[in-house]
Image (cartoon, grey):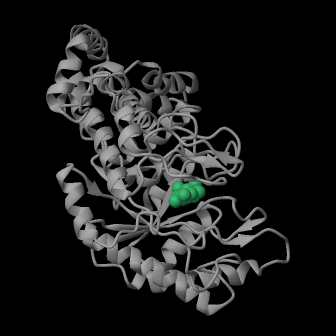
């Protein structure tokens, strides 16, 4: 097999040649269609080209479940190799210039070297993620019964110190946010005092908050359940918002799309957090039942569109304190993670483009006239329009691929990694 570097601009440009004529024709046709709605297609393409989403470092390795993990070929073995894969995703899509790290999974002795390695690949860093939901080798105290909310102040102090370490590492890397998700909670009624556990959380979180540099934000991520199956301390956006409001102006709520009860109206939550000026960002993924790790847009693209509809509303209204971080948080158990992450980044751009082309003046008029059917139809017209030519054109404008997956496969990148990265023996299940 002849290998090519999928990050090489000449390689991408030559791969694009096969698709260029079809794209030009499709883009022109869509432009005419949108023109009839009073929309200039190039404005939408420019906005889509400006869209960015961070890649989770933990997403480029093959994931698993608690039943097992089936490793993929040529998986990255350390954070430096993870960044190599992230660079492939970014070059082909033009949409993912940053990476969100998870410590201690991505721990290295030399964060300066890591920053330079990333810069050489054209990458920067988004929010740092702490991990107090697992014990690490050599760790003095266990998180089995909690971390930031543990009944033992010494365990809480250890968990707080870890979060402060994450801030310090992130400061070297140029990150400007810390995402805190804890699995703390109870598996049995009676196991923990629901009120006091939350109070302990607030106290621990306040110590972390105090360590934030001036230009940093703290993202509080809620999750309804898992690993605590009866009651999780930060289980919903209400707890998250209360915590953010108690901590101070640098604390915001992070919405992971997979962390809600089935059928919950997530776009409503987004609207409320925008109103409260506390929407910090997203972990995008999709889910069908109780999972939180399927590829963004793969199950419920309409819901994703409705979330983006709220974001576009806020953007157009210049909502105060509105600057949400976009991050993916998925686990790829049966696909090549690079392909899933590229596809997911594009699905987010799709939802964004669909939301951008909603005819908002008409929508407002129909709403005001209580024309329910036409309101619904007007909103949905954005969703049912195939905006693929806009997405492809946006990628081309950034040196990306018209057809990222095909271009990636043809490069032989994964096969080459399979040779240069002999797989590590991995036992048991796990999320990474
Ligand atoms: C959790 C949560 C966190 C992520 C871990 C791996 O469910 O989504 O954001 O860091 O998984
Ligand atoms: Mn998450
Ligand atoms: Mn999750």
Q: Answer above or below: position of 359 versus 294.
A: above
Residue 128's image quarter? bottom left
Relative to 300, say whether 117 is above or below. below
| Viewport quadrant of the N terminus | top left
Looking at this view, name the residue that lies furthest to the left.
10
Q: Quadrant of residue 213?
A: bottom left
Drawn side of residue 343 relative to residue 204, left or right:
left
Q: Residue at x 71, y 78 (%)?
A: 145
Q: Residue at x 49, y 59 (%)?
A: 254
Above or below residue 409? Residue 94 is: below
Residue 267: image location, x then y, percent: 54, 45
Who's the residue at 39% across and 30% down the image? Answer: 350
In the image, is residue 266 above or below residue 237? Answer: above
Q: Nearer the viewer, residue 356 or 163?
A: 163
Q: Is residue 132 left or right of residue 395?
A: right
Q: Is residue 42 visible?
A: yes
Residue 241 x %, y %: 54, 67
- Write down the quadrant of residue 49 in the picture: top left
* Residue 319 showing in the rendered view: no
Q: Position of residue 235 (x, y in %)?
A: 65, 64
Q: Nearer the viewer, residue 222 or 130?
A: 130
Question: How many numbered circles are shown?
Answer: 0
């Amino acid at each position: 097999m002849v290998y090519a570097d999928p990050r090489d601009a000449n390689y991408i440009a030559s791969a694009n040649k096969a698709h260029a004529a079809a794209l030009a024709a499709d883009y022109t046709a869509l432009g005419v269609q949108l023109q009839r709605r009073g929309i200039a297609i190039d404005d939408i393409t420019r906005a889509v080209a400006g869209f960015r989403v961070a890649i989770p470092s933990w997403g480029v390795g093959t994931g698993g479940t608690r039943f097992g993990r089936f490793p993929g070929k040529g998986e990255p073995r350390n954070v430096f190799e993870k960044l190599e894969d992230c660079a492939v995703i970014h070059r082909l899509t033009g949409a993912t210039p940053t990476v969100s790290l998870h410590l201690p999974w991505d721990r290295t002795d030399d964060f300066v070297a890591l920053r330079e390695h990333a810069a050489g690949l054209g990458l920067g860093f988004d929010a740092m993620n702490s991990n107090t939901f697992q014990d690490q080798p050599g760790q003095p105290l266990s998180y089995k019964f909690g971390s930031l909310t543990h009944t033992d102040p010494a365990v809480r102090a250890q968990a707080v110190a870890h979060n402060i370490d994450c801030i310090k590492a992130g400061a070297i890397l140029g990150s400007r946010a810390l995402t805190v998700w804890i699995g703390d909670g109870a598996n049995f009624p009676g196991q923990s005092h629901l009120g006091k556990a939350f109070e302990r959380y607030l106290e621990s979180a306040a110590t972390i908050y105090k360590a934030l540099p001036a230009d940093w934000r703290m993202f509080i991520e809620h999750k309804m359940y898992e690993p605590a199956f009866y009651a999780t301390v930060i289980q919903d956006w209400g707890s998250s918002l209360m915590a953010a409001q108690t901590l101070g102006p640098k604390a915001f709520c992070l919405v992971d799309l997979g962390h809600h009860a089935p059928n919950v109206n997530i776009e409503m939550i987004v609207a409320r957090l925008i109103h409260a000026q506390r929407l910090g960002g997203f972990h995008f993924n999709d889910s069908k039942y109780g999972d939180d790790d399927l590829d963004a847009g793969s199950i419920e693209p309409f819901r994703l569109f409705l979330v983006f509809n709220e974001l576009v509303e806020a953007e157009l209204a210049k909502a105060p304190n509105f600057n949400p971080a976009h991050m993916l948080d998925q686990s790829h158990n049966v696909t090549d993670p690079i392909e899933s992450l590229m596809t997911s980044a594009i699905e987010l751009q799709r939802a964004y483009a669909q939301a951008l082309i909603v005819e908002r003046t008409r929508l407002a008029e129909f709403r005001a006239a209580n024309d329910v059917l036409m309101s619904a139809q007007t909103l949905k017209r954005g969703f049912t329009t195939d905006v693929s030519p806009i997405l492809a054109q946006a990628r081309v404008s950034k040196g990306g691929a018209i057809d990222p997956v095909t271009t990636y496969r043809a490069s032989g990148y994964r096969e080459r990694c399979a040779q240069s990265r002999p797989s590590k023996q991995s036992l048991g299940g796990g999320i990474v």
